[in-house]
Amino acid sequence: MAESRPPANPTPVTTTDAGIPAPSDEHSLSVGPDGPLLLQDHYLIQKMAQFNRERVPERVVHAKGGGAHGHFEVTADVTPYTKAAFLSEVGKRTDVFVRFSTVAGELGSADTVRDPRGFAVKFYTDEGNYDLVGNNTPIFFVRDPSKFSDFIHSQKRRADTHLRDNNMQWDFWTLSPESAHQVLILMSDRGTPRSWRHMNGYGSHTFMWVNAAGERFWVKYHFKTEQGIDTFTDDEAKARVSVDPDLHIRDLASSIRDGDFPVWRLEIQIMPFAEAATYRFNPFDLTKVWPHADYPPITIGRMVLDRNPDDYFTEVEQASFEPANMVPGIGPSPDKMLLGRLFSYPDTHRYRIGPNYLQLPINRPKVPVHSYNKDGAMRYGPSSDPVYAPNSYDGPKADTIRYGEEAVWEADGEFVRTAYTLRRDDDDFGQAGTLYRDVMSDTDRDHLVTNIVGHASQDVQVDVQRRVVEYWRQVDPDLGARVGKGLGVG
Ligand code: NDP
């Protein structure tokens, strides 16, 4: 006997983007079967014109990525340190969207190449969106935003051949000794994570927290993977490039689809406000971590990703993260890189997506917006009168008592263009040396040397190779000697 099946949903009728039933899925309008096409075929013209406009400019950095939805849950009381509403009580949950990415490659580049990984979290909080736009490393290559575009140029493509070029990468790095700590991690197997699920995420910068009493603290964030750190060797990562260039997108999507939801616990390090002034090195320098012995990590929350995007373009490609999105109770620090990024992220989104990017579903807050901004390309949310402040017509009013500027610090001095003031333990190589000698295993060190030698052997000029050896010698004499031997230069 035939099984009785529920009636199938009726197949929807194809329409134009204006919702008008389309005349055909396959044939354009022509004069006779063999004749010329007609300009009045609005449906054909709409299809072709829309297709030509399918791309927005790809991100200049972090172009290739993937993401997922989930939630963050508070697991420890942090109200002594911050009044941020989404952190106000144990058990409180906030929706998040997270985007992972490579940095230097283009939109179609392979996921497993050696690169830092972006780890950007958007918290849809009760007081607006909070974006923590970090990486899978706790530090960065440079400490002044004026070097950022130069750094990225050196990692991308040459002007003449349009080729990536290891020579220019090592040229820039060895002339920028502050990069050594980050290059060490990049050249270790952590530079080739097995998946996005198997890596940590770090806020990297120092931020300020302010509690309800107005007391200020400095804070660092570390998302620690509960899946465990797992990496590819250089050979394994390179082999995956041809087998599955989209491995990391596929891995995240399939694990979530199968109910194996990735989890990270959030740890913070807290530094009392006054200690920053006298700490043995500049705690706002993005090329340095705060040693755990000085500022022990405290676990405060748990992040779970449990829902894949329905539409890659509208949820991942148009997702716009900006470190400037900070909610009451959280603020910036004197980290010059952070201060530069506060400008550059919203600026790139205005260019890439348009001035009303914050109205798109993935970017808009889950709380009402009452701003006096209006109009601009592709705006669709309502603006209402009065459209100016101050006004006498019951328009929104800033609550300066409750939300006035609190995340502040004192500064004075002449205008200068100079590095941070050096302190007792400020140097470019010390923390990298500690990682190499005291944290890495013998296997980590062996792979590191192999990876550096392999990378610096390809198209790198001998004078630059000599600097490569000296760069690593300053991190650790043994490391320099091993790299020198591998490259065959003294
Ligand atoms: P700890 O021994 O307390 O911490 C070492 C940290 O290194 C751990 O967080 C560990 O975290 C991480 N780690 C372990 N293996 C590697 C690796 N192969 N590559 C990169 N990171 C690794 O020492 P300290 O806090 O005094 O830091 C010592 C050095 O460790 C620092 O100079 C820095 O280079 C590195 N480090 C320090 C971090 C910090 O915030 N203090 C964070 C990350 C690295 P996990 O295995 O969970 O990733």
Image (cartoon, rainbow, N blue to C red):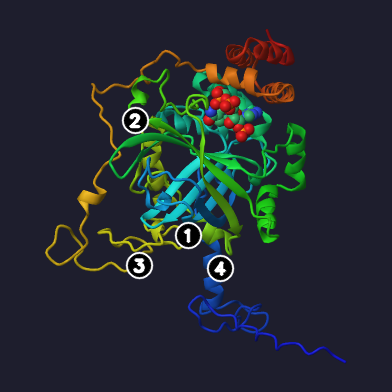
Q: Residues within 10 Å of mark 3 (few under 14, many from 20)?
A: few
Q: What is the spatial separation of the Cα atoms under label 2 and label 3, in whole angstroms?
A: 41 Å
User: Answer yes or no: do the residues labelled 1 and 3 have beta carbons within 8 Å?
Assistant: no
Residue behind mark 1: 362
| Residue for badge 2 | 273
Q: Dot 2: within a 10 Å radius of its alpha carbon, few (fewer than 14), some, or many (20 or more) residues?
A: some
Compute the Cα span from label 4 to label 1. Answer: 27 Å
Q: What element carries label 2?
A: loop
Q: State the CA–CA distance, disc 3 to disc 4.
A: 28 Å
Give the amino acid type for the residue marked by disc 4 in the picture.
Met
| Labels 2 and 3 touching (C-beta < 8 A) | no
Residue 199's spot in the image, x, y percent? 63, 40
Q: Which residue is drawn at 56% across and 71% down?
A: 47
Q: What residue type is labelled 2?
A: Phe
The residue indicated by pointer 3 is 381
Q: Are marks 2 and 1 in contact (CB under 8 Å)?
A: no
Gap in angstroms between the C-alphas marked 2 and 1: 35 Å
Foreground of the two, 91 or 128: 91
Tell us which disc is closer to us: 2 or 3.
2
Is 49 displayed left or right of 424 in the figure? right
The residue at which mark 4 appears reads as: 48
Residue at position x 55%, y 78% from top? 38
